[in-house]
Amino acid sequence: MSTQRYGYGTMLLHWVHAILVLGLIAWGLYMSELPKGPERSFAIGVHKSFGIVALAVVILRLLWRRSHPAPADLRLSEVEHKLATAGHHLLYMLLVLTPLAGYLSASFTQYPMRFFGIVLPKPGWPDERFNAFFNGAHVFLAWSLTAMITVHLAAVVLHAIRKKPVMGRMLPGRTPID
Ligand code: HEM
Ligand code: HEM
């Protein structure tokens, strides 16, 4: 056998995180089109709460990964392996920085940082310039993340076309992959 599956814990974290992040991107697009008013405030509140969950999940994922490294895929060439590793590192970086910038952006407003109704501490104070800076960073990072996820999906499809499918590595099953 030249490749193995990721562990079940890693799979669970990957799919929960993927749904969360794709949902946050779609919700972020929807809410940014809403006119100012209670509906927009509510939508932003929901986005902030789930965004904080996404930040907690990526931290958990990175801690988990320290003791559960990615299984080697011996079908890949050295260059392919290096590209995949670099791509995953970049993804992880954006997955940390995007919610962090969102959290900082929301910290420099007059509004309390609510997490599903619970008021959390925030490291900022009402300041328009800081708010605008971190908001700009958050939007830029969110779009970079969307681009990287597109590359990620393209890589999965490309591997399938080239008859070295990687999808099975991230899905549970009993039969060997390859
Ligand atoms: C919904 C479509 C998605 C599919 C089909 C998919 C599929 C996969 C597959 C097959 C792998 C294993 C790659 C390998 O062979 O090493 C993987 C790894 C990974 N995926 Fe996804 N993914 C999806 C969405 C996402 C999203 C939205 C994110 C961001 C939250 C994400 C983040 C990652 C990361 C960081 C890894 C590297 C795991 C590690 O080695 O620690 N994926 N994905
Ligand atoms: C992985 C996590 C996150 C993703 C993928 C994400 C994604 C997005 C997207 C796509 C937008 C719309 C960008 C646009 O206007 O074009 C947005 C806006 C925003 N996000 Fe996030 N976000 C995340 C986490 C967070 C967190 C943790 C917070 C704060 C606690 C947050 C606060 C905001 C705020 C305040 C806006 C701007 C709302 C507005 O004034 O239009 N986000 N986010």
Image: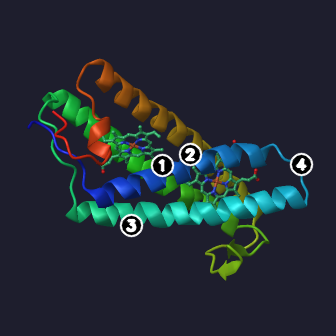
The residue depicted at 15 percent of the width and 39 percent of the height is 3
Residue 84, how many percent across, how many down? Answer: 28, 36
Q: Which residue is mark 3?
A: 60
Q: Which labelled disc corresponds to residue 35?
A: 4
- Do callouts 1 and 2 mark residues in contact (Cβ within 8 Å)? yes
Q: CA distance from mark 4 to mark 2?
A: 23 Å
The residue depicted at 89 percent of the width and 53 percent of the height is 36
Q: Is 34 located above or below residue 55 in the figure? A: above
Q: Which residue is mark 1?
A: 18
Nearest to N terminus: mark 4 or mark 1: 1
Q: Secondary structure at mark 4?
A: loop
* Front label number (4 vs 2): 2
- Count neighbours of disc 2 (C-alpha within 10 A) and say few if under 14, some if 14 to 19, many if 20 or more: few
- Do callouts 2 and 3 mark residues in contact (Cβ within 8 Å)? no
Which amino acid, by three-letter code, is at mark 1? Ala
Nearest to N terminus: mark 3 or mark 1: 1
Q: CA distance from mark 4 to mark 3?
A: 35 Å
Q: Secondary structure at mark 1?
A: helix
Which amino acid, by three-letter code, is at mark 4? Pro
Work out whether residue 112 can be spotted. yes
Q: Is 172 located above or below residue 147 in the figure? A: below
* Front label number (3 vs 1): 1
Q: Which labelled disc corresponds to residue 22?
A: 2
Work out whether residue 104 can be spotted. no
Which picture quadrant has residue 91?
top left
- Do callouts 4 and 1 mark residues in contact (Cβ within 8 Å)? no
Nearest to N terminus: mark 4 or mark 2: 2
Residue 171, how many percent across, how many down? Answer: 32, 45
Which picture quadrant has residue 52?
bottom right
- Mark 2, ligand 1, within 8 Å: the answer is yes
